[in-house]
Structures are given as C-alpha cells and as structure tokens.
Image (cartoon, coloured by chain):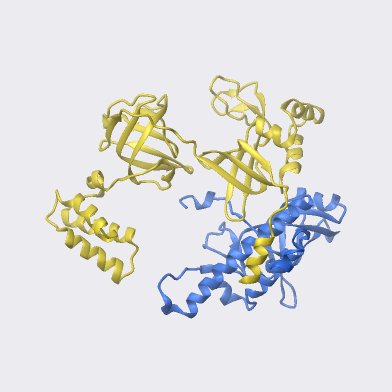
Chain colours: A yellow, B blue
C-alpha cells in the first residue's frame, strides 16, 4: 500500500463513524496536496483532517481516539500531541493539589516521563510497578521538560507483561564554555526531602536554615552545533577537579569566602574538551561518566575531504 | 523552539580569517533585547564564538581606565580580543598572562567601523582560559570540520540556485543567501584556509603524500 493510501485509510477510519466518505475521496484530496501542491505528507494529512472535521462539525478532541499515535517516550518533543504509550509506572508521587488524582514517573525502554492524572477524569488507579497501555494521553511541556496528562478520554489497560525501562542516556562531546552561577561550594537545605540550594542562607521553602555544604558544577558544554547544560554532582565535581568537598571547605574557610572555590574550578574546567555521558533530566544532562578529551584529534580524514571538495 | 528566549546561543567554531570577514551584523526581530548576530561568509549566524589559539601580545590600550587588547592567533589569522571594566575576569587574564600562551576564548562578535570605512571585527570575551596544546589542536580539527560542513551546505544550496530544474529538493539556506548578498569573497577561500589549518598540525605531516 502506498504511503498516501495508508494515510487516507487512517483518516477514513477516524471519520467513518461520523460522515459518509470513501477512502478514494480522502486519497484524492491528499494526492492533490502532495503531488500537485508539493505539500509535505504530514501537513497534507493535517489539512485533509481539518477539512473533514469541519464537514462533520467536530472538534479535533472528538477524534482523539483515532488520531493519537503510538509513541515512545524519547520521541515526546512537542506539547499538545495526542499519543498512545505503553509504559511502566516507576514511581508514584504525592499529588500537591486536590485536582490531581495521581502523579508520578512512567518509563519505557527509551526513557522516562512524568505523568499527571486528573481527579475529574475518574480513571482507574495506576499501581507502582504496573505496566499499562495508555491510549490517548496528551503531551505537555513546562520549562523544557515534557510530561503526559491522562484525561477523561484516556483508555487505561493494564498489561500482564514486564517492561524494561531505559534511562534516556545522552552522550555529549564538546568544549565546556561556561560555568554558571550556583556552581562550586554551595549550601543545601537540611530538612528531610528538601535539597534546595540556599540563597543567602535562606531556603525558598523553609526560610533561614543551617545549610549543609555540597559541591557541584552547572556548566554549558557546547559542540558548535548545540549548547547542552550539564550538572556535575559532588562525586563528578571531585573527580573532575581533584578538589574534595573537605578541601573546598578549607579553601573557603581560609579565604573567608566560598566564591574562591568556584573561581578555582572555573580556571580548571572552562575551555576544556570533554566527553560526557549521563541521563537527561529536562534540559540538564547529569554527568555520570566524564572523560577529558586530550588525545590527538584525527585531522587526516578531514584533510582528504577538504582537498577533494 | 517554544522557548527561544531561554535557549542559550551556541558558540560557533570559526577560523580567524572567516571571523574577521564577518562584518555584517543583524537581528532576527525588532525587539531591542533580541540577540545580535554576525553573518559568517560560509552561511551561518554567530551570536557567540569559541576560539582557541596562541595569545601573542597583550596591551592596555585604554585611556582613562584599563582596556586590554589581546591578539589570539590561529593557523589562518588573528582574533582581536578586547576586555575592559565590564569584562573584569577576562581583562585580568589578559593583564596577568605572559605571552605566548595557548588560550581559549568564549565571546561575542563585535564590529567597529573605522574612519576610513573599514569594518573591524573583534571578540568581546565572556571567559578567557589558559589551555594546552592538545586543546588547541582539537579546536583546529573541530573548527575545520564545522567550517567544511557549512561550505558543503552553502555549495549544495548554490548548485540548487544555478540548476533549479534539477528537482525540488532545494535545501533552504537563509544565511547562505544572505552571505551571497552581503559578501564578495567566495567560500572557496575558506576551504583553502581549512586545508592550510589542517596542514599546520604536526601529526598530519604525512597526509600530504597519501592524499
């Protein structure tokens, strides 16, 4: 079956309950857009779908059941997409609002994503560790992090199978071009489950507290094509700089100033090339495995290419 | 990008010869806070650059207050780096470093028109760090690669312009188009600079014979 025919079939399936239309008719409309007007197939499909929505007097949401597509978690990169996912509930978190029935983390072999289930949508309860097929969830984005929302049109089906969960690992090779504020020797709120970084001795949640020292680097690693934000935790920072948390505290004590630590670290790391591997959390990559790239780079292949262009 | 305003501008890799030819600057919107871009002659925009080279000279050219100028040399030419009171960390590196030394510079392109109408392009540094030779060599190879990629895309676009009937797979290349309108120098010059830069690396001396 041709590509266009397949799309025509899909669209036809969505509308066959609502209006009287033949697959050929749908295909003709798609073909006109794709062949004559050079519209990309995705756009053509969207346009044809809109045409039938109007003819049937429907909203896009009414169709959601048919128009959502099976997706993998790593592919979620746009808000307001209707998708079907098969995922395991890795963790359930405490909802912060009465309007939320359940909130937590879903995972599939390609990665993890936050989910929210609204109270008013009256869906079955998801169990931690359970594997579910979730049809018709909608994607959302907040500050660069994606999530999925279960809604009243979502179909939840528990599956009796195991699902391996991947960890969304990124590999970046590039130069560390910037170290951001909040790096070096920092203090965190000591309250249980609160690890917020203190600003002038204050926690946003708990006010003035006796902070606990920690070491970290928030950096930008850039390969000339993309700028990636990378976080080095205490262990990664100690390994990278050779400065331990204890030494950092001593340095700050001697100078009566914690910023000496950040200055020292900046001198060591900015302008250096690294290969960094680690899981992605929203816009940050956590530096699990760091290697300084100080070996010779291969120029010969490039020279041959440059000469032959 | 749904959050264009939060997206950090990437640091382009560009050799000094091309950077110094990037005399045309523009903004993508009328917003006064919109970022400024220098137009690279190989067809890309640069709001930030990352350069590594040899700091050969430093001089305080300021009159009332300190204003440091550093010359950072790569295999194709010289980056001029200016740091004053608003770039205190970079200025102190220029003040304290004894040339010659390998340095990396992260900074923004700035243009300045002289009385005779020549446009000079310089770098306003965000950071300057002392680095080693391996980092310098890696940068040369990386910059060669990025430059060749830009040239390849430029030429693909150019071929398409010259033979539009050959198919509708035209790669749109907004900045190649802009570069052709604004600049006279052919991209071929930058390909030659890439070859020259790669040949200058010691570990490829033998490639000449085999290529």
Residue A77 in the image: x percent, y percent? Answer: 43, 47
Looking at the figure, which quarter contains the C terminus of chain A?
A: bottom right
The image shows residue B33, relative to residue A153, as above or below, that is below
Q: Residue at x 62, y 76 (%)?
A: B183
Q: Residue at x 42, y 24 (%)?
A: A94
Specify the farthest residue to the left.
A20
Looking at the figure, which quarter contains the N terminus of chain A?
A: bottom left
The image shows residue A272, relative to residue B164, as above or below, that is above
Which picture quadrant has residue B168? Answer: bottom left
Q: Residue at x 76, y 31 (%)?
A: A257
Count how many numbered circles sit on residues in the image. Answer: 0
Residue A36 in the image: x percent, y percent? Answer: 29, 71
Residue A250 in the image: x percent, y percent? Answer: 78, 26
Q: Is residue A127 visible?
A: yes
Give whichever of A61, B85 is nearer the camera: A61
Q: Is residue B112 visible?
A: no
Residue A5 in the image: x percent, y percent? Answer: 24, 59
In the rendered structure, the answer to whether residue A131 lies left or right of residue A51 reads: right
In the rendered structure, the answer to whether residue A135 lies left or right of residue A113 reads: left
Specify the farthest residue to the top.
A192
Which picture quadrant has residue A251? Answer: top right
Q: Residue at x 54, y 50 (%)?
A: B7
Give whichever of A231, A31 is nearer the camera: A31
Specify the farthest residue to the right.
B98
């Amino acid at each position: 079956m041709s590509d266009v025919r397949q799309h025509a079939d899909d669209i036809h399936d969505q509308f066959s309950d609502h209006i009287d239309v033949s697959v050929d008719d749908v295909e003709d409309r798609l073909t006109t857009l794709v062949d004559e007007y050079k519209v990309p197939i995705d756009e053509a499909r969207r346009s044809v779908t809109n045409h039938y929505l109007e003819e049937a007097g429907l909203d896009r949401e009414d169709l959601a059941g048919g128009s959502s597509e099976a997706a993998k978690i790593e592919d979620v990169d746009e808000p307001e997409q209707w998708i079907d996912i098969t995922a395991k509930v890795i963790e359930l978190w405490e909802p912060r609002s009465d309007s939320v029935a359940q909130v937590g983390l879903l995972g599939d072999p390609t990665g993890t994503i936050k989910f929210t289930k609204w109270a008013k949508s009256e869906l079955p309860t998801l169990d931690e560790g359970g594997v579910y097929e979730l049809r018709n969830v909608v994607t959302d984005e907040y500050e660069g992090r994606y999530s999925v929302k279960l809604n009243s049109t979502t179909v939840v089906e528990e599956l009796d199978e195991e699902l391996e969960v991947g960890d969304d690992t990124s590999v970046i090779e590039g130069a560390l071009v910037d170290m951001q504020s909040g790096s070096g020797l920092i203090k965190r709120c000591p309250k249980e489950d609160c690890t917020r970084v203190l600003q002038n001795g204050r926690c946003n949640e708990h006010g003035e507290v006796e902070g606990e020292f920690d070491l970290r680097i928030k950096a930008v690693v850039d390969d000339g094509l993309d700028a990636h934000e990378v976080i080095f935790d205490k262990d990664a920072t100690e390994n990278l700089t050779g400065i331990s948390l204890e030494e950092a505290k001593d340095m700050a004590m001697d100078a009566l100033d914690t910023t000496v630590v950040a200055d020292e670290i900046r001198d060591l790391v900015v302008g250096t090339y690294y290969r960094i591997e680690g899981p992605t959390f929203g816009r940050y990559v956590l530096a699990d495995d760091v290697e300084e790239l100080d070996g010779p780079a291969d120029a010969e292949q490039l020279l041959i290419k440059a000469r032959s262009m | 990008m749904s959050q264009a305003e939060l997206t950090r501008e990437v640091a382009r890799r560009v050799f000094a010869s091309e950077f110094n030819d990037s005399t045309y600057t523009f903004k993508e919107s009328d917003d006064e806070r919109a970022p400024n871009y220098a137009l690279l002659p190989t067809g890309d925009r640069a709001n930030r650059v990352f350069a590594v080279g040899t700091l050969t000279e430093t001089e305080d050219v300021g009159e009332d207050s300190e204003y440091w100028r550093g010359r950072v040399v790569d295999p194709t030419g010289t980056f001029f780096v200016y740091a004053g009171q608003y770039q205190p960390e970079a200025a102190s590196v220029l003040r304290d470093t004894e040339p010659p030394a390998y340095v990396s510079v992260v900074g923004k392109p700035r243009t300045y028109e002289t009385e005779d109408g020549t446009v000079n392009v310089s770098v306003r540094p965000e950071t300057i760090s002392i680095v080693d030779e391996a980092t310098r060599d890696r940068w040369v190879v990386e910059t060669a690669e990025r430059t060749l990629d830009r040239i390849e895309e430029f030429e693909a676009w150019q071929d398409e312009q010259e033979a539009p009937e050959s198919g509708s797979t035209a790669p749109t290349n907004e900045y190649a188009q802009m570069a052709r309108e604004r600049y006279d120098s052919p991209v071929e010059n930058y390909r030659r600079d890439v070859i020259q830069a790669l040949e200058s690396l010691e570990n490829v001396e033998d490639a000449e014979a085999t290529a």
